[in-house]
């Protein structure tokens, strides 16, 4: 990304203000907003260009081997722009490695892919090995806790005492799931008669 001389002047002024806070004129504020808009636009354009390049690269890769020359050129451009080669790229380069450019690109892509995998694994293992410090959970004022009287530990609620709204006792399992009643056995007289 390249800045014009005017944009560099605005950027320098914004950095100076960030280091030494002072009141801004309306013109300075407008200049900073315009610069921020230009930077956002440039970032968005770079993203669109990258997406177009990757889609083009995929089209050429899917048309191999007939598009080998164009594919190799696009892959070189993508690698120069920071593209991490995918397994499809490595497979395509292995199929094309008979040429010197394809063989050199395959070697370069294998190094980049290995470096990328190691970086991902190092990031995962570092995150798994050393979890971040946990902060204690604190109760915030308000809610039901603010209106409830503190209970004394070890004193159960007395039966028959009116409960406060929102403070219900825990139901017993027999209240939630009443016991099943077994059918009564037939009288013994009917058995003897039958």
Image (spheres, rainbow, N blue to C red):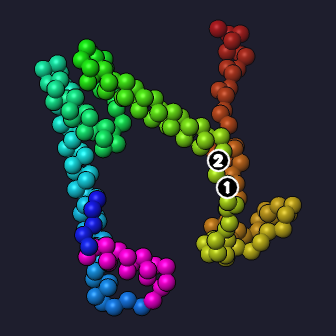
Using the image, tell me which numbered label, if any, was put on residue 131: 2
Residue 96 is at least partly visible in this image = no
- Judged left or right of residue 114, residue 137 is right
- The CA span between labels 1 and 2 is 8 Å
Magenta segment boundaries in residue numbering? 6-22
List the residue tagged with mark 1: 134
Instruction: Judge the density around disc 2: few (<14), some (14-19), many (≥20) Cα neighbours within 10 Å.
Output: few
Q: Nearer the viewer, residue 180 or 26?
A: 26
Q: Position of residue 15 (x, y in %)?
A: 42, 76
Asked if residue 192 lies in the magenta stretch, the reply is no
Using the image, tell me which numbered label, if any, was put on residue 16: none
Q: Position of residue 169 (x, y in %)?
A: 70, 59
Quarter of the image where the N terminus is located: bottom left
Residue 19 is at least partly visible in this image = yes
Please give the name of the residue rendered at 64% of the width and 8% of the height, measured from the top-left corner: 194
Q: Nearer the viewer, residue 149 or 176?
A: 149
Instruction: Identify the element where label 2 is drawn.
Output: loop
- Looking at the rendered image, the disc whose residue lies closer to the viewer, 1 or 2, is 2
Please give the name of the residue rendered at 67% of the width and 60% of the height, measured from the top-left corner: 135
């Amino acid at each position: 990304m390249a800045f014009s001389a005017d944009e560099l002047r605005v950027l320098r002024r914004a950095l100076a203000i960030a280091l030494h806070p002072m009141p801004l004129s309306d013109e300075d504020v407008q200049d900073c907003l315009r610069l921020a808009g230009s930077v956002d636009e440039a970032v968005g354009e770079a993203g669109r260009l990258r997406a177009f390049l990757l889609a083009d690269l995929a089209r050429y890769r899917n048309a191999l081997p007939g598009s080998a020359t164009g594919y190799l050129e696009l892959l070189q451009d993508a690698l120069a722009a920071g593209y991490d080669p995918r397994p499809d790229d490595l497979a395509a380069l292995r199929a094309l490695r008979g040429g010197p450019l394809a063989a050199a690109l395959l070697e370069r892509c294998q190094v980049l892919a290995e470096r990328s995998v190691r970086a991902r694994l190092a990031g995962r293992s570092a995150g798994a090995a050393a979890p971040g410090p946990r902060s204690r959970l604190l109760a915030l004022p308000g809610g039901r806790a603010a209106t409830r009287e503190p209970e004394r530990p070890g004193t159960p609620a007395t039966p028959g005492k009116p409960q406060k709204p929102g403070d219900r006792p825990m139901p017993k399992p027999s209240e939630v799931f009443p016991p099943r009643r077994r059918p009564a056995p037939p009288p013994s007289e009917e058995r003897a008669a039958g």
